[in-house]
């Protein structure tokens, strides 16, 4: 059945004066840690890159990275920031990540910073297949996604927004095309200022203006 939460107008979120809740101006800490641990290899696909702090951080360290996103506004902003910073190894394009082509077998690492939980559930399998097609044999995949209970009951079903996953759902959707190496509990950071309209949400906070929400970090690889 089609979820009523699928009607998210992503581009409009990027046309507002203030950054969207997920654009924290730096890579999600869970993914930054993977970079620090040397687990990311070029070429990298940043799936659903948004403002692309992750791609830009990777390019600044010498990685070749492609960011794809459905939002033309986000892609334009990411392209402009890369140009401003002289980061020529990061390129961006508008694409539907559930049905893109042109990159067959190219990427050694696929990174998903909050994309999977943003897709309508019926598009998840198409997405997993599309990124597998774009990945090289043996490629690594890392997905950072909200847990199903990340917001408790605070998001009613008729509201556009993320659809978190249970660990079992996450494993089931990814394992069709990838070999799963690990799934563990993880935190996703958001801008606290974006949550003032939802005072009932009992969320963990840091002292740097972020809310911390529950999720999972999945690690997988494409069979060689
Ligand atoms: C929660 S945001 C995360 C953005 C970015 N990865 C980050 O960490 O800031 C989800 C992103 O997925 C993008 N998106 C949603 N559906 C998409 C699709 N079918 N194809 C490509 N991008 C999509 C949205 O435009 C948005 O930028």
Image (tube, rainbow, N blue to C red):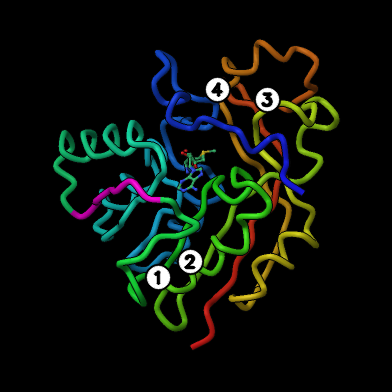
Residue 126 picture quarter: bottom right
Name the dominant secondary structure of the magenta segment.
Answer: strand
> Circle 2 is placed at which residue position?
130
Q: Is mark 3 within 8 Å of ligand 1?
A: no
Front position among marks 2 and 3: 2
Please, what secondary structure does the residue beneath circle 1 have?
helix
- Distance CA(mark 3)–CA(mark 4): 8 Å
> Circle 3 is placed at which residue position?
205
- Distance CA(mark 2)–CA(mark 4): 36 Å
Number of other residues with Cα within 10 Å of mark 3, as a class: few under 14, some 14 to 19, many 20 or more: some
> Circle 1 is placed at which residue position?
134
> Circle 4 is placed at which residue position?
208
- Residue 156 lies, in percent from the top left, at 80, 26
* Sequence-earlier tag: 1 or 3: 1
- Residue 11 lies, in percent from the top left, at 43, 30
Magenta stretch: residue 94 in it? Answer: yes
Please, what secondary structure does the residue beneath circle 2 have?
helix
User: Residue at (77%, 32%) from the top-left corner?
Assistant: 151
């Amino acid at each position: 059945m089609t979820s009523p939460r699928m009607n998210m107008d992503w581009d409009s979120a990027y046309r507002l004066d203030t950054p969207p809740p997920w654009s924290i101006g730096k890579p999600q800490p869970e993914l930054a840690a993977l970079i620090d641990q040397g687990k990311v290899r070029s070429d990298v696909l940043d799936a659903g890159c948004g403002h692309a702090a992750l791609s830009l951080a990777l390019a600044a360290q010498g990685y070749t990275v492609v960011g794809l996103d459905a939002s033309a506004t986000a892609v334009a902003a990411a392209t402009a920031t890369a140009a401003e910073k002289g980061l020529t190894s990061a390129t961006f394009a508008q694409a539907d990540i559930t049905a893109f082509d042109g990159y067959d077998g190219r990427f050694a690492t696929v990174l998903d910073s909050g994309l999977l939980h943003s897709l309508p559930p019926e598009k998840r399998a198409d997405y997993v297949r599309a990124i597998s097609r774009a990945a090289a044999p043996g490629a690594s995949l890392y997905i950072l996604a909200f847990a199903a209970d990340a917001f408790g009951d605070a998001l009613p079903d008729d509201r556009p927004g993320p659809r978190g996953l249970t660990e079992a759902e996450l494993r089931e959707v990814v394992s069709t095309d990838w070999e799963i190496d690990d799934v563990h509990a993880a935190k996703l950071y958001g801008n606290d200022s974006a949550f003032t309209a939802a005072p009932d949400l009992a969320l963990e906070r840091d002292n740097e203006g972020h809310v911390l929400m529950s999720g999972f970090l999945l690690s997988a690889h494409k069979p060689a």
